[in-house]
Image (spheres, helix red, strand yellow):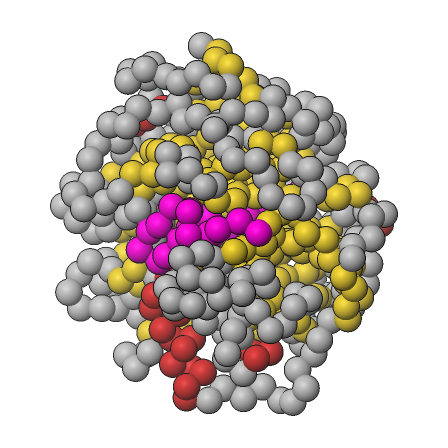
Amino acid sequence: MRLTTGRRLGAALAAGALVLCACGGGGGAEPPPAGLPLTLVSGPTPFSATCSGSSPGATLYRNAEVEPSIAVNPRNPQNLIGYWQQDRWSDGGAQGLIAAASFDGGMTWTRQAPPFSACAGGSYARASDPWVSFAPDGSAYLIGLAFTGDLFQPGSSSAVLVSRSSDGGASWSTPVALIADGAQAFNDKEAITADPTDAHYVYAVWDRLVSNTSGPTYFARSADGGTTWAAARAIYDPGANSQTIGNQILVLPDGTLVLFFTQIDDAGGGFSAHYAVMRSTDHGDTWSAPAKLADALAIGARDPVSGAPVRDGANLLSVASSASGMLYAVWQDARFSGGARDGIAFAQSSDGGLNWSAPVQINAVTSTQAFTPTVRVGANGKLGVSYFDFRDDHGATGQLPTDYWLTVSGDGNNWSETRVTGPFDLRNAAHDNGGWFLGDYQALAALPEAFLPFFVRANADAGNRSDVYATRLAYTTAGATRLQARALAAPLRITPQFAAKVSDAIHRELRESSPPRRTHAHRAH
């Protein structure tokens, strides 16, 4: 079935992928605010209001798209695949996942709903955490979390599913489960990486929360281009009362795998977290011990007037690698303000992740909160980092003006910033347990001649609270704001008050496990 943008499905959905044609329109979105010219990628929901069942006390935000991912075909940079959650629930997950393919560099898109959830013909009630990756032979892989029921509750289940495309995203295989669990465990926050040095290898990682114990990192590998997968296994267990989250793999030019994750620890008196790296030189057969990258010191974004929380990317890394093997990481961090507000931290490694530079701040306006950064490496080693901030919030009640920015650097020290879009009112976004929500992450692609931010912003429409957009910024375009990365003026000092804010942010953005004895937490999927 093929539909043009603006038409809607009936209540029944046939099994298999639903295809919709999008040409930068539809969805009832408001005209975009100031910034770069935008292409609207998402459109009206293909799902019925009841296809994922009911959830007592929860709100279904139909037409609300969140948490996008994007990948570029290395054999044809005009071929892009975007991927996001469609119809977000307030208590976690979405009615389904939408994959969109472009064959003209992001100008037009064709959308599909692969069967990761019941709404698209699958077996699980909801889906979440979309991630997409291209292999060097042009094959593409989607991964998603699929689940039914709440964490550890009787009858609940979760699975990590993978689907493959051999035609640039025009069609997708039936998803296969890398792991499937009942109520005794919950799989969360997965990512997939097709090895850019060898199309035979594809890697998936996630955290698997075990009731009342811990949350180790799980790993699964295909050595035959996704035809078969080895059994999933734990490759790092942080121990009781601890878990990993945000696991993702980069591959260096020599084939070395570099695994990044956040480790969260609960010592009983409060939460703490740090970012860590592990390496493998044998395609994931064996792994090094974890090495610390940096402390995770986000306090989370809040409405500057009301103090109401924002569900952002706190405590999650975004990472990228260059053709020469340089590694880059960005994250939210309050260290630059002594715990007053989050800024955007940047660090780099020239030795495959063994050692990292001291974090520096790269958001232009340091007097305001900045959050949810994404980093990619473009042509000639150009670095691009996108993020949200509140610089246009001047204290008006009932609004939360938010901007999205792209800052570009050739050396990691000097940065030039351009407004992508904004201001828009973040209070119009879907709301979940952690606050107003556009996604734990956004996306950024590097084309031969331009960066392509692929992101969600809120709409002033209660029936269509957010949409996915794409735009381009040529590498040669100079932004209006230039700055040098800012290092800490004095040695980092974590006061008890600062530590309490960090612990509170982790606790706020992680939902506690259901068993009565609190031993670990998880981020609301």
In magenta, the rendered stretch is 423-446
Asked if the magenta segment contains residue 312, the reply would be: no
Examine the rendering and report whether any part of residue 157 can be seen.
no
Q: Residue at x 35, y 58 (%)?
A: 434
* x and y percentages locating residue 377 in the rendered image: 73, 51
* x and y percentages locating residue 134 in the rendered image: 63, 35
Total labels: the figure holds: 0
Q: Nearer the viewer, residue 416 or 137?
A: 416
Q: Residue furthest top?
A: 1
As drawn, is 481 to the left or to the right of 425?
Answer: right
Q: Nearer the viewer, residue 244 or 512?
A: 512
Q: Is residue 296 above or below residue 515?
A: below
Q: Quadrant of residue 209?
A: bottom left
Examine the rendering and report whether any part of residue 360 can be seen.
yes
Q: Is residue 6 above or below residue 471?
A: above
Q: Residue at x 45, y 71 (%)?
A: 299
Q: Which quadrant of the rendered structure holds the N terminus?
A: top left
As drawn, is 8 to the left or to the right of 254?
Answer: left
Q: Nearer the viewer, residue 315 or 357?
A: 315
Q: Residue at x 56, y 21 (%)?
A: 22
Q: Quadrant of residue 198?
A: top right
* x and y percentages locating residue 92 in the rendered image: 32, 47
* x and y percentages locating residue 402 in the rendered image: 54, 55
Q: Residue at x 57, y 43 (%)?
A: 455
Q: Residue furthest front?
A: 396
